[in-house]
Image (tube, rainbow, N blue to C red):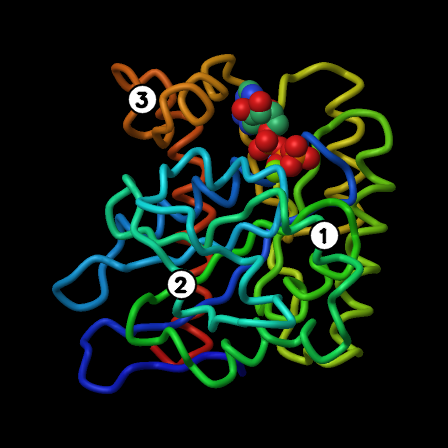
Amino acid sequence: MGKRSVAGESGGCERMWLGIGSVKGGVGSTTAALELAYAATRRRVGRRHRRVAVIDLDPQAAATEAVEPASREVGVKDVFATRQQLSLRDVLVPTSWPRILIAPASRELANREVDLTPASMHVLREARDSEEIADLVDDVIIDIPRTGGRVAFSGLLATERFFVTAKATMWAFQGAEDMTYNALRVKGLGNDRLSVSGYIVSDYEESSASLRILNDMRARYGKLVCDPPIPRASLVPDALESYHTPCREFGDGDLSSVADRYQEIYDALLKRERETDGG
Ligand SMILES: Nc1ncnc2c1ncn2[C@@H]1O[C@H](COP(=O)(O)OP(=O)(O)OP(=O)(O)O)[C@@H](O)[C@H]1O
Ligand SMILES: [Mg+2]
């Protein structure tokens, strides 16, 4: 369910709408969204590489900053606008990351929280269901803000494969539980395609305390915990925030251990998707 293959393209062309989020801040959601997007573009559909749209729902716009959009004149705020509303298609712009388009976030997105009507909360889901951007991209990756408000809700409504992010520190387990609860609630409120595809523990440094938290998550969520966790690497902020470059492309392979883990997570997801799709 929730997969549409494009006939005539060898190797399968599963279209995936991924959402990444957490109820806690600073736990690696944006990093995961961007690294998974980059990982997707290294894979192929037939003879060409996959193409990705990132939808940045966070008014802080960290994902938007990182990929350097060609323009910020339009953005997600216009998709949610009550007047002069634009379609998702109209706000996707090229970025400096090859094969990645972005629907840019901006500060105005915060104002949309109060304006968003129940109907407009469904605009992204409708774009998914109508396959409005299916000719432009293969995967859509939504950076869902931790605010838990209407904008975040609209992202969850469009998500098919949801990744919960966590850091192995105090309250991580509770945070993952709360996020799972929210996501599954949305499933019953208009998005029956949503499932939790994984728990990504990032910025992980081995200690007895963090191992205990990780083990609690393994005991609770089993194989859904992406194992091993994403290691802590102090250069990750330099790559994405200062140099606006994915971990794979940064320095002299300094961050390949981080890039490899995100690639494995994406590849495992794509493999599962293809298996469920019957090859
Ligand atoms: N594996 C890692 N090793 C070291 N630092 C990391 C790692 N992953 C992410 N970070 C850093 O941790 C900080 C928070 O990450 P990120 O912005 O991805 O989290 P977030 O959950 O999206 O935060 P926010 O709540 O602000 O949206 C960033 O400075 C990021 O560069
Ligand atoms: Mg973020």
Would you say 88 lies left or right of 154 here? left
Percent across and percent down for residue 231 are: 54, 24
Identify the residue at image location x=45%, y=40%.
Answer: 262
| Mark 2 lies on residue | 139
The residue depicted at 40 percent of the width and 71 percent of the height is 15
At numbered mark 3, what does the secondary structure look like: helix, strand or loop?
loop
The correct choice, above or below, for 249 with respect to 24 in the image is: above
CB under 8 Å between discs 3 and 1: no
Q: Tell me if residue 154 comes above or below residue 148 in the rendering.
A: below
Answer with the quadrant where ligand 2 appears in the image: top right
Q: Earlier in the sequence, mark 2 or mark 1?
A: 1
Give the Cα distance between marks 3 and 2.
23 Å
Judged by depth in the image, the label closer to the viewer, 2 or 1, is 1
Q: How far from the left and from the top, in percent, is residue 126?
A: 56, 81
Q: Which residue is mark 1?
A: 111
Picture coordinates of residue 83, whole percent (x, y): 60, 72
- The structure residue drawn at horizontal position 70% and vertical position 51%, both measured from the top left corner, is 222
- Amino acid bearing label 1: Asn
Q: What crowding class fits label 3: few (fewer than 14 Cα within 10 Å), some (14-19), or many (20 or more)?
A: some
Q: Which circle's residue, 3 or 2, is located before the other in the chain?
A: 2
Q: Residues within 10 Å of mark 1 (few under 14, many from 20)?
A: few
The residues bearing labels 2 and 1 have C-alpha atoms spaced at a distance of: 28 Å
Viewer-nearest residue: 24 or 258: 24
Q: Which mark is residue 250?
A: 3
Does 200 appear above or below 101? above
Q: Amino acid at mark 3?
A: Phe
Question: Where's the C terminus, which quadrant?
Answer: bottom left
Q: Residue at coordinates 79% horizontally, 56% vertically from top-left?
A: 149
